[in-house]
Image (cartoon, rainbow, N blue to C red):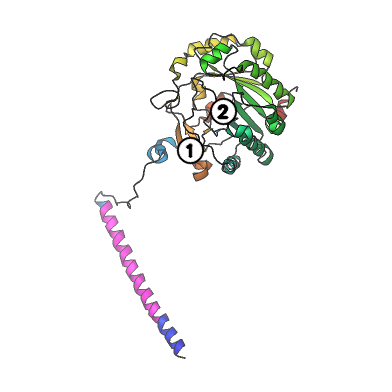
C-alpha cells in the first residue's frame, strides 16, 4: 500500500515540474523571438552558432561557384587507380605523386556506387594499370565490372609493356576495349618522349598486342599524344595496317602541378605544340577513318576522372582540384565538384559504340 502512495506522489511531483518547465520554455521562446525582431528592425543580423575551426576543403572554399546545381550523369568514368608507372613520358599529366592504391573491396564498393548512379562505361588507367600486382588487381576489377555489375563497356588504357598473354586468357572475355599508347612508330622518337623500357621495342610490342586482341576478341584502340617530337611524322600506313577501332589523337596538354610548375614531376613545356601544328598533323591523316582528334579545348574538361582515392578531379583551372571521395560523400555530392563539361563530352564523340558485343568486329 505504501508503495502505491509513494508512486502516486512521484507522478504528481513530475507533473508539476513538467508544467513549470513548459512555462519557462514558452517565456524563453518569446524573449528570443522578440529580441530577433528588434535586431532585424534595427538592421542587424542574428549571429550563427560558432563552428569548430578546421582546414577548409575545396568544397567549402570554392564550392559556391563550382557546384552549379546541374545534375551530372556519370555515364563514362575514367578511374586512375594508380599513379605508378614504369615509363617516363615527358608530357605525362597524371604523374607518380603517390603510391596509394585502394584495397580491392573498397574499389569494388566505389564502382558499385558509380553503377547505381548511372555509369555505363568504366575505363581503367594510371600510371600504368598493369604494374600493380602484375595486372591481377586490374583483372579482378575488369571481371567484377563486366560479370557482377554487367556494365556495357569495360576498357583499359595501357602502355602495353607489362601485358602478358596469360592475362588475356584469364580476363580477356570481360574486357571490351584495350587502348595502347603509342606516340611514334620510330623507336628513337619514343626514346626521346620517354616511352621506352630498356631494350624492349615499343612498336614491336604494339603489333604483338594487336594479335592478342584479335585472338581473345578484345577491341583494339590506339592513343597518341602529338607533341614537338612527333608532329611531323606520317603515321598513315602503320595505323591503316593495325586497323584499330579508334585512333585517339590528343594535343599535348599542360596541367599545373603534374607536368608544369614547381611541384610537378614532369616538364612538358618543351613538348607543347601550337593549335596550328596540331591541325597540320590532323590534316595529314584526314584519310584515316578511325581517327578521333582531341585538341586541348576538347579534352581538358570533358572527362570524368577519378583519382586513386576515388575523388573526382576538376581541371577547369588548369590544374587538378580533387573533390571529396565518393566513398565518403557519395557520387551525387562528389560529382558536383568534377568540373565536367557534359556538352563537350558529347560534342567530342565521348559516347560511341563501346561494347564489343555491338561493334560486330571481324575477329
Mark 2 — residue?
Answer: 128
The quadrant holding residue 356 is top right
Query: Which residues are drawn in magenta?
Result: 11-40
Name the secondary structure under disc 2: loop
Say left or right for 204 vs 45: right
Residue with the most extreme right position:
362
| Residue 108, placed above or below residue 354 | below
| Residue 268 appears anywhere in the view | yes
Across and down, in percent, residue 290 comes to 64, 18
Name the secondary structure under disc 1: helix
Q: Earlier in the sequence, mark 2 or mark 1?
A: 2
Q: Confirm whether the magenta stretch covers residue 33.
A: yes
Q: Nearer the viewer, residue 149 or 268?
A: 268
Would you call the spot at circle 2 few (<14 residues within 10 Å), some (14-19), or many (20 or more)?
Answer: many
Q: Nearer the viewer, residue 249 or 101?
A: 101
Residue in the image at 40% along x and 77% along y: 15
Front position among marks 2 and 1: 2
Mark 1 — residue?
Answer: 336
Amino acid at each position: 500500500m505504501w508503495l502505491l502512495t509513494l508512486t502516486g506522489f512521484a507522478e504528481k511531483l513530475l507533473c508539476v515540474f513538467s508544467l513549470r518547465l513548459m512555462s519557462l520554455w514558452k517565456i524563453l521562446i518569446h524573449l528570443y523571438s522578440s529580441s530577433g525582431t528588434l535586431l532585424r528592425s534595427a538592421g542587424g543580423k542574428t549571429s550563427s552558432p560558432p563552428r569548430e575551426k578546421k582546414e577548409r576543403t575545396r568544397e567549402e572554399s570554392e564550392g559556391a561557384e563550382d557546384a552549379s546545381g546541374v545534375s551530372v550523369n556519370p555515364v563514362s568514368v575514367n578511374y586512375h587507380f594508380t599513379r605508378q608507372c614504369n615509363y617516363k613520358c615527358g608530357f605525362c599529366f597524371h604523374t607518380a605523386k603517390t603510391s596509394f592504391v585502394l584495397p580491392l573491396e573498397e574499389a569494388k564498393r566505389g564502382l558499385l556506387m558509380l553503377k547505381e548512379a548511372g555509369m555505363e562505361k568504366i575505363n581503367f588507367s594510371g600510371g600504368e594499370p598493369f604494374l600493380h600486382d602484375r595486372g591481377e588487381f586490374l583483372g579482378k576489377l575488369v571481371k567484377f565490372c563486366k560479370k557482377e555489375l554487367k556494365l556495357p563497356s569495360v576498357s583499359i588504357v595501357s602502355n602495353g609493356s607489362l601485358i602478358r598473354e596469360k592475362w588475356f586468357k584469364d580476363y580477356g572475355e570481360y574486357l571490351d576495349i584495350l587502348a595502347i599508347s603509342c606516340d611514334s612508330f620510330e623507336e628513337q622518337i619514343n626514346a626521346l618522349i620517354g616511352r621506352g623500357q630498356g631494350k624492349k621495342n615499343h612498336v614491336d610490342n604494339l603489333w604483338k598486342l594487336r594479335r592478342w586482341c584479335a585472338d581473345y576478341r578484345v577491341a583494339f584502340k590506339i592513343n597518341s599524344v602529338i607533341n614537338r617530337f612527333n608532329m611531323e611524322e606520317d603515321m598513315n600506313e602503320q595505323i591503316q595496317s593495325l586497323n584499330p577501332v579508334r585512333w585517339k589523337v590528343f594535343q599535348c596538354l599542360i596541367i599545373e602541378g603534374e607536368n608544369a610548375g614547381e611541384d610537378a614531376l614532369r616538364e612538358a613545356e618543351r613538348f607543347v605544340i601550337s593549335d596550328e601544328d596540331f591541325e597540320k598533323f590532323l590534316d595529314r591523316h584526314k584519310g584515316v577513318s578511325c581517327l578521333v582528334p582531341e585538341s586541348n579545348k576538347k579534352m581538358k574538361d570533358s572527362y570524368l576522372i577519378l583519382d586513386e582515392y576515388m575523388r573526382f578531379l576538376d581541371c577547369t583551372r588548369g590544374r587538378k582540384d580533387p573533390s571529396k571521395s565518393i566513398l565518403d560523400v557519395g557520387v551525387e555530392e562528389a560529382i558536383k565538384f568534377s568540373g565536367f563539361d557534359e556538352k563537350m563530352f558529347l560534342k567530342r564523340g565521348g559516347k560511341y559504340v563501346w561494347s564489343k558485343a555491338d561493334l560486330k568486329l571481324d575477329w
